[in-house]
Image (cartoon, grey):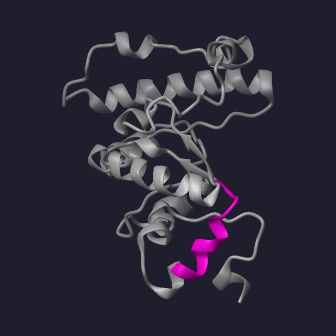
Amino acid sequence: MDNLFVNYPVCVTSHIRFFEILKGNNKESNYLLHRLCNSIVVIDELQTYNPKHWDKIVFFIENYARPFNIRFIIMSATLPKIDALSETLKGHFVNLTPNKKQYFSNKNFAGRIEFDFLLLKKPKPSKENKEEYLTELAYFIKHEADDYSEMHHQARVLIEFITKIRLLIFSDCSLNLMFFKITNCISFPETFLNHKEKR
């Protein structure tokens, strides 16, 4: 019963489920609609929506916020304030951090990562020397990981490969590193993962 009526102080749900509550007319949606009264709704990563739906999102926010006394918090690092899509809402959206540059320029935030573009200066490998290039890359990563581990007592490296063939070539010359496979392809042999874990 608690799950049916969401009798909890905090609820996490998908975007699809949330807007189904706002626009749906089935009984499951109606059970939950009243729970939105006097609530704070956080919508994260709004920019992932197709832009053709942004005006619809603004419409729902506009027509539910005041009658239901809902505070909407729209989370997006790239999307501008979308209240401009509504004549009546325009100018009513406010930034949670009006002085965001103060935080973004703070050394604890802006200086937490240093980028190294040394590898981009290398020429693109040809088909004939890709294996040699991956071997050199493996040595470079191992060297950088060892340096980092000396300072921080451990190092974890995440490498993304577009093809499994490149991964297999890289793993064969990667200096006895421990590998963990992260993939959504069920055809990729589990023996590869087990073999690399034992190296």
The reply to whether the magenta stretch includes residue 73 is no
Q: How many marks?
A: 0
- Spot occupied by residue 70 in the image (x, y as percentages of width and height): 63, 54
- Spot occupied by residue 62 in the image (x, y as percentages of width and height): 47, 49
- Spot occupied by residue 117 in the image (x, y as percentages of width and height): 45, 13
- Residue sticking out furthest to the left: 127
**Residue at x 41% of width, y 16% of height:** 119
Q: Which image quadrant: the N terminus?
A: bottom right
* Residue 172 seen by the camera: no
Q: Determine the main secondary structure of the stretch shown in magenta.
A: helix
Left/right of residue 144 with respect to residue 160 in the rendered view: right
Q: Please, is residue 89 above or below residue 49 in the view?
A: above
Left/right of residue 88 with respect to residue 179 in the rendered view: left
Q: Please, is residue 80 above or below residue 26 in the view?
A: above
- Residue sticking out furthest to the bottom: 1
* Residue 15 seen by the camera: yes
Left/right of residue 185 with respect to residue 126 in the rendered view: right
Q: Nearer the viewer, residue 114 or 136?
A: 114
**Residue at x 58% of width, y 52% of height:** 66
**Residue at x 33% of width, y 42% of height:** 166
Q: Nearer the viewer, residue 37 or 146?
A: 37
**Residue at x 60% of width, y 22% of height:** 143
Q: Please, is residue 151 above or below residue 155 in the view?
A: above
Q: Magenta residues?
A: 30-40
